[in-house]
Image (cartoon, rainbow, N blue to C red):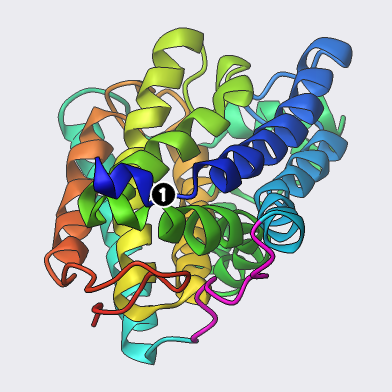
Amino acid sequence: MTRVRDVHWSAIGWYLAISFGLAWAVEVYLILGRGVSFAGIPPLLAQWELAAVMFTPALGAWAVGRFVTRDGLRAAGWNLGPWRAYAATYLVVPAVFVAAYGLTWALGLGKPDWGLSVFLAQVERLVPGSAARAPAAPVLLAVVAVSSLTFAPLVNSVFAFGEELGWRGFLLPKLLPLGTLPALVLHGAIWGLWHAPVVWAGFNYPGHPVAGIAMMTLFCTVLGIFIGGLRLRYGSTWLASFAHGVINAQGYGVWRMLFPDADPLRGGATGVVGLLLWLIPALWVLRGLDPPRRTDQAGLTGYR
């Protein structure tokens, strides 16, 4: 009970109200007001609007730090972190995706579309005539695969920072009085529920609006242990943003193009197969964390 009382629940409540309220308002408008579906490739304007939504957690963290706790964002984890952690993340994340889709194929939960027929059809619906001008499928796959390992992680990290400043920079430290593992699990589950409207509209789990929300919550809980563990272990929200960016670069790059029919609940990097694989780096990061000796505003004293 003492640990529960040590949590600044009013600050967390205001943060969640702002983060959820702004994000869900935009997403509900896109889904119900404009009829946008997030199964497949949404319209380009909706993609940019959804990218803007990624900054609502940062806005919530700033507003609460400025007007509620009045401690700013000093505890947000501004350390850059060691380059070896970035290198390890850069190698581990693609390895999880390779294993996830390799197992998806081996278990009959999806098969490669080497001709990219589904992807090109989706692009054609958005930009008529584009499929005829597209390069050959092997060339297109090679280009996207290379980009997902080079500049795409950096570009995605910029947008991911909007989320990371909120979830890992603000919320996670505020929950640390509950204990390291409870804080990691709870903040990850909340992060998953934040995606509920777009998941209901087909994001990541098309055709499974309710089960998809449950699965997204589990997925983000495990992923939250991995990314949140990196943030705590190295005191760096920049590193968390990079990890999030590498994951998005892989998840919305070559693999979605190549495995469009993967069973969304069981296969791929966000289904049961992926969930089990993400547990490996999550537990690896978790084992390097010491219990915090104190949980003041910084909330990180005692971590290596």
Looking at the image, is 22 positioned above or below residue 142?
above
In the picture, which quadrant includes the C terminus? bottom left
- Name the quadrant containing residue 293: bottom left
- Residue 209 x %, y %: 51, 11
Disc 1 secondary structure class:
loop
Query: What count of labels does the image hold?
Result: 1
In the picture, which quadrant includes the N terminus? top left
Residue at horizontal 63 percent and vertical 70 percent from the top: 73
Residue at horizontal 23 percent and vertical 53 percent from the top: 179
* Amino acid found under the numbered disc labelled 1: Val
Does 141 sit left or right of 294 as displayed?
right
Residue at horizontal 25 percent and vertical 77 percent from the top: 303
Is residue 261 covered in magenta?
Answer: no
Q: Is residue 39 visible?
A: no
Does 216 sit left or right of 139 as displayed?
left
Q: Residues within 10 Å of mark 1 (few under 14, many from 20)?
A: some
- Residue 261 x %, y %: 42, 23
Q: Which residues are the magenta region?
A: 69-79
Looking at the image, is 55 positioned above or below residue 257?
below
Magenta stretch, overall SS: loop
Observer-nearest residue: 63 or 144? Answer: 63
- Residue 106 x %, y %: 16, 33
- Name the quadrant containing residue 70: bottom right
Q: Is residue 119 visible?
A: yes
